[in-house]
Structures are given as C-alpha cells and as structure tokens.
Amino acid sequence: MVYTISGVRFPNLPSIKKNSSLPSFNEDLRRTNAVSFSLRKDSRSSSSGKVFARKPPSDSDSSSLATTASEKLGGHQSDTSSSVTDQVENTQVVDDVDPPKIEQALETEKLDQTSALSTSGGKENFAKMSPSVEQEVGQRRVPPPGDGKKIYDIDPMLNSHRGHLDYRYGQYRKLREEIDKNEGGLEAFSRGYEIFGFTRSATGITYREWAPGAKAASLIGDFNNWDAKADVMTRNNFGVWEIFLPNNADGSSAIPHGSRVKIRMDTPTGIKDSIPAWIKYSVQPPGEIPYNGVYYDPAEEDKYVFKHPRPKRPTSLRIYESHVGMSSTEPKINTYANFRDDVLPRIKKLGYNAVQIMAIQEHSYYASFGYHVTNFFAPSSRFGTPDDLKSLIDKAHELGLVVLMDIVHSHASKNTLDGLNMFDGTDGQYFHSGSRGYHWMWDSRLFNYGSWEVLRYLLSNARWWLEEYKFDGFRFDGVTSMMYTHHGLQVEFTGNYNEYFGYSTDVDAVVYLMLVNDMIHGLYPEAIVVGEDVSGMPAFCVPVEDGGVGFDYRLHMAVADKWIELLKKRDEDWQVGDITFTLTNRRWGEKCVVYAESHDQALVGDKTIAFWLMDKDMYDFMAVDRQATPRVDRGIALHKMIRLITMGLGGEGYLNFMGNEFGHPEWIDFPRTDQHLPDGRVIPGNNGSYDKCRRRFDLGDAEYLRYHGLQEFDRAMQHLEETYGFMTSEHQYISRKDEGDRVIVFERGNLVFVFNFHWTNSYSDYRIGCSVPGKYKIVLDSDNSLFGGFNRLDDSAEFFTSDGRHDDRPCYFMVYAPCRTAVVYAAVKDDERSSLVPISLLPEDV
C-alpha cells in the first residue's frame, strides 16, 4: 500500500517516532555544551583567519585544531597509497559500527575517486582534487577584490566613518584570502552541495553532514526500514559525519528515488531524528506534523531538461511579485504546473518582464508566507516536485521573463524536528547562541554569519538555486534585520550616518552580504540582486569592489508606508510636496525598486490600496452597468494615479504584487485553526479556510466589472515604460508641486507627467513647463473610458509649445487638467505618430 505526494510514492510505514525523549515540535531547547566553529576575528597568531573547532565533550582530545573542516573533508586524496586502516584510525568510530562494512565503503569510494572526506593527508581541497571541478573552476572565477575606496568619491560624507568602512572591507578581503587559501576560491567554496548532503557516484551514494555536537549518528529511512543500527555513520575530527552506501548487486541505487530519509543523532539533548540539512526535497506525510526528507534522484529520462536560455537582463525592471500556492482563483493550494500554464502568460500579457516568486524554500508553516524556512535547499513540495519548478522557470524564460527568487537568509524556522534549529542538539551550530540567536518579533532563529560552515551553507544555497534551477537572481528578504544587531526593531532611522556605522552594525552579516553579492555577480554577471532594506544603508547598491555591499537594487519600502498613511487622511490633508519628497528620497546613484503595495500591505490586519479606497462599496458597486458611488469613483481614480506616480517618480524598477494591478479586494489570510495559548487564551483561526488565500484573477478579466479597467490601465503603464524606458532615464525634473492646485508636474526621460490630485477642481489652459520645444501628444490618460474614466480629454489632440520660461523650464504648453487625473505627454516630430496604443490593439495573447 502506498500514498503519493507530489508525484513521489512512499510506502505506508508505521510512525518513525522511536523515542519519547525526542524534542517536541517547538520545544525551547538550550545548549548544554557549546561548540565553537566560527571564523577567528583577531590576528594574534600566524593562523589568524582560519577556523578553530573544538571537539564535543565526548572526545578525549580537547585540543583546538587550526584547520578548516573542508580541508579534512576536502576532496579526493592524491596519495592513493594511503591505507584504509589509516583512514579508519583517523576517524571517530561510534558504537555498534561494523568495521568491515566501513572499510568496504571507504575502499569502494576511494577506488571510485569520489571521496571528499579523508582525514589523513595535508590541506588538499575539493577543487584541486577533482579534475572535472578543476576544469570548471578554471572557467568560472569570482574576480579578486578591489581596493574598496571608490565609495569615498561617490559619497564624501562616508569619509567621517572611514575607520568603520575600512575595517569592514578589510574583514571582507581577509575572508576572501582565507577562502582562496583553504577552499580553492569562492567559486569552489560556494559548491558545498557537491560535498555535503547526498551525492551520487557511479558506485554508490555518499551522505555527509556537519553536526559537531552529535555523539553518534545513523542514516535511517524507508530504504533500511528505519533501522538505526543498519547504516551507522563515522565522524572526523571536525564534526563531519559520513557514510557511503554502495550500489546494490544489480547496480541499482541503495536508496531508491522517493525514499524518506532522516539522520538519527545522539545529541547533548538526547536522541533526535532530523531532516538532513542539505536535503533537496521534503514532504509532509498525511496525518503527520513534521516533514520528512526525501531522497530525490529520478531516472535520467524523468529529469526535466531545460530547453530555453536565460533572457538578457532587462534595462528597466518591472517585477510581478507572486506566490504559487495562492495563485489560483479557487480556494486551494495551486501548483507549479498551473502557475506555469495559467499565470505566466498573464504576467507576460500584462507587460511585466520579471516574475518574483515567494515561498520557494520549504517551510513547514504555510501561513509564514514562506519566511520561516525549514529546508533551505528544497523547493516547497506543496506546489509539486523539483522538476515541476524547473519546468515553470523554463517556461518563463521561453516567454522572455526573468525569474527572481525571494530568498531568506536573514533567519530560519525555530522548528527542531524538520528545521536547522538545535540540529546537532546544540543551540549554536548554525545560529548565535542565547538571545542573540533569537528574533523575538519573528519567533525565529538568527544565523551566525561569522561561522565558516554557516558561510559555506548560505553561499552554497544561493549558488544552488542559480545553478540547479536557473533562477535569474534574488530578492533578499530581511536585510535590515541582518545588518544591525537591533534588527531594525524599535529603531527609527533618520539618515544620520552614525546610525549605520557603529556598534549596532553586525559587520559579520554585512561581510556575508558582500560575499554573496560578489559570488553571484562574479559567476552570473547577468543576475539581478535586490535587497530589502528599510534603513537606507549608504553604499548598499555600490559594487563590492568599490567598497559597497553589492546589491543591484534596494526596495524603496517607505513609499508604500506613505500611501497607507495618506489613505487614512482626508484628501484635503494630502500634501503634494510630501508625496514627491517620499518618492524621490533615495540615495543618488543607487537604484531602487519601488512599489505602491506589495504582499506586506495585503496581509490580514491590513488592506489593499483598493480596499482602503473603496471598502465595502467594492462588494456591490463594481459592475459597469450600475451607477458607481462617489467612493468608488474616487477609489478608481486615485488607484490609477497612485500607481502611475509611484512608477513614474519613485525608482529605477517597479514591483506589483499579483492581483493588485486590478485592485484586488479585501486582504490575504492563510488558513488557520484556533491557537490555544499556555495562559488559557485562544486566538481564533478561520477554520482552515483558503477563501482569502487566493487571487481572483477572474475579477480583472471580467469586462463587465470595473476591476477590468484598472487592470487595463496597469497594462498600459507597463507598455508605456517598455516603449519609453522612463524609469532608467537619467533625466528627472519636478517642475511643479502646487499645494493650492494639488498639481504635480515632472519630466522623466522624454515624457511629461501631469497629476491633478484635487478632488473637485479641474483646470483649463493650465501651463505645463517643459524642456523640449515642439509638438506634444497624449500617450497615457487615466481618464480614458477604457480605464474606467470619464473621457474628459481628447487623446488625439496635439499640443504646441510656446517660448517663455515657466516653472524654470524654457518653454511651456497649455492643457486641460481634469480633477483626479494623471496624463502623460510625449514630444513628437511632425512626421512621427504618438506611441499611444489603444488597449484593444495591445497584444492579447502570448
């Protein structure tokens, strides 16, 4: 009898909960014996910068070893005369190990030249010892560091904090040097997935795990009937456990594809079964709470093969933020396949050139929106198999869409049975120990970015998604939390540089961000990296070689907060100067991705912009054949204006969360059951309902509903940007911020934008200053009836400039500016047609 999850078949076995002393699902376990395994920060010895490890108390020898773990688990031994006996003698053997079996495995793997864990010999590394890897390293290298001094030319104010910044860059250079020396370079160091976890060779499977706190370890799973004595692992002096499983006599794999697997460890806090830290796939069996790791290795003919190359990096980045699970119109969890077939063509038709996908890394708690990651190398099995995800990405590439992954390296789930927390029974293996390793607001664990093996794990994780799944880049979540020890909590950033460069800055975390950006851009020059930072850290989007953190874009998060702030006020209380200041308040020379609202603004407890504007009237007055209420008329007009001025003035890239392009009503609420707190209080759930955890794309497609006009306006916005490329133009000039008229006029590229935010006043013969003389035509009009407007303008009209300065511009033209409208004008030559394309003529199908 079997059951099937995401196309993988599993035998119906008894529960694998073997020991009542196992930690509970969310038990708050504390470390009893700390294991130090982090990068040394001082230079008090000639070994400075190397990793120092201390054996757990179970080891008789407590001396420190000034060698990196990878130097011992590094690569194939060049000296093939080393005896198997030597290898066994230098390996800690746990109880109940069958020595002949270990010798057989080691000898088999040695003959196959795939062992990466010999503890004898010198400081050989993986890159040097593997011919195939050595060839790849020769082809792909991360460029050496620069001098890191250009930031002082870019921003002279940084000179007052030169001591901090020079120290930071010095730490980065020092770490790069140590990685070059001990790991063969950043390129090799970021391929830890070729050493750790499950690796397959012609003769068998090797499984390796770094768990220095464990006293004994066994690999268990369906393949050995969960027998902890069947496949006992051996350990080297650096806390890396290993086992080799030779192929069966018939040549088949010792672990069949789809088998559930775990590692059972005797830890300082007791016996525990854990999902391997480097697992590539995990599932939640029916009726169980913790996930199970899955050995995912389909037959060659069943593996997805990419057919389409990555698209070129777009000049103007227009991102469609999405979540696979909630992308169905039906109240259910959607799949990679359905997203590929139904949502990707929609994104292409709307005119976006990038899709950013949330919740890819496996997370046991669905309502975490994917931010409480449990298995960092595994794509979420809720939506399908790894090959289904590859098919999705390949289809996006076929459509010319770049695919960004919302990656989480800022924190991790605190789950102990299916996550990294207390993995080897200690509090500080992957995370900081004690309170520093706990995020009190997110209820999650915080990585120790000063640990060598944590660096390997996270760098390899970013590399894995780019290499294996062909993602085109990342949106790094929670970067503000990473860069400061206060995590940005209960802190108001004012722009004072002392807030960025002081004792509250986590230099280890910033250096990690520099490393990962350096690795990504060095190996994948076309990759796009966006950082979620609300603090305004200077040099955040300056290349690492120049002394910056290395991101391509910063999320301009203040804009969305400003819109919510204004929507809580009366129109009469809006200040146009406040709007333009917020939209343009960003660091010169550092690119931003701006948005009016993302997924954050739609979560339960908040509302979408459309719902803020129209509230309950959206339920009864959105049909075009029914008279709209004043609230609906106001909401539709301002919804379009807010989105266009955000795109027009707020950044060099634009983001929209799926469904918000047509004014998705209500909020997002993941299925929840009642939560019973220890003090007896009950937090009510929603009866596990998916009703608010979906996207009603049918509303935007229905031509008889006013949602359709909003969707078509968003589509026209994307087309306008594609045609004129105004977001990346260096020319941006705000010529008018009239608080009395409530009018904003600005130039961006070759376009002139006119916004009239007044709720009743329309202006005839309104002078619009411009820098280019000649003829202008309307290229986008929010009042067009196609967009749910009142058609108060003649979009075929021509406007001719007059000489004479106006608003500090050399010439001007006269327009009619209806209330609550946004109109975009473009200069055209006499023999040139306007680029305004009626929506009916835009591409309908992909």
Image (cartoon, grey):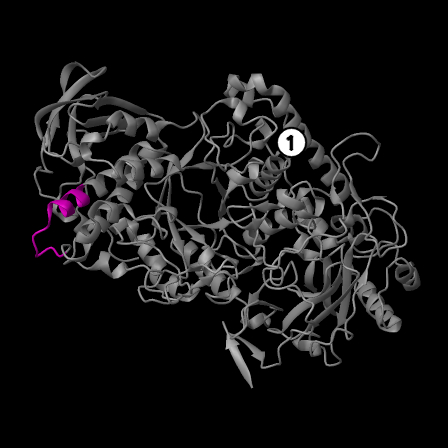
| 453 within the magenta span | no
Q: Residue furthest front?
A: 680
250, above or below 138, in the image: below
- Residue span colored magenta: 623-637
Q: Quadrant of residue 209?
A: bottom right
Residue 104 placed where, x, y %? 85, 71
Does residue 314 sit above or below 153 in this rendering?
below
* Residue 147 to residue 833: above or below: above
Residue that sits furthest to the top in the current view: 804
- Taking the image as shown, residue 451 lies to the left or right of residue 605, namely right
Residue 782 in the image: state x and y as whole percent: 17, 40
Residue holding disc 1: 145
Residue shown at 49% from the left, 71% from the top: 6
The answer to whether 497 appears left or right of 794 in the picture is right
- What residue is shown at x 58% (from left), y 60% (from top)? 26
Front-most of residues 491 and 147: 491
- Expressed as whole percent of the image width and height from the top left, the position of residue 725 reads 32, 36
Q: Quadrant of residue 669?
A: bottom left
Is 104 left, or right, of 265 in this rendering?
Answer: right
Left or right for 482, reference 210: left
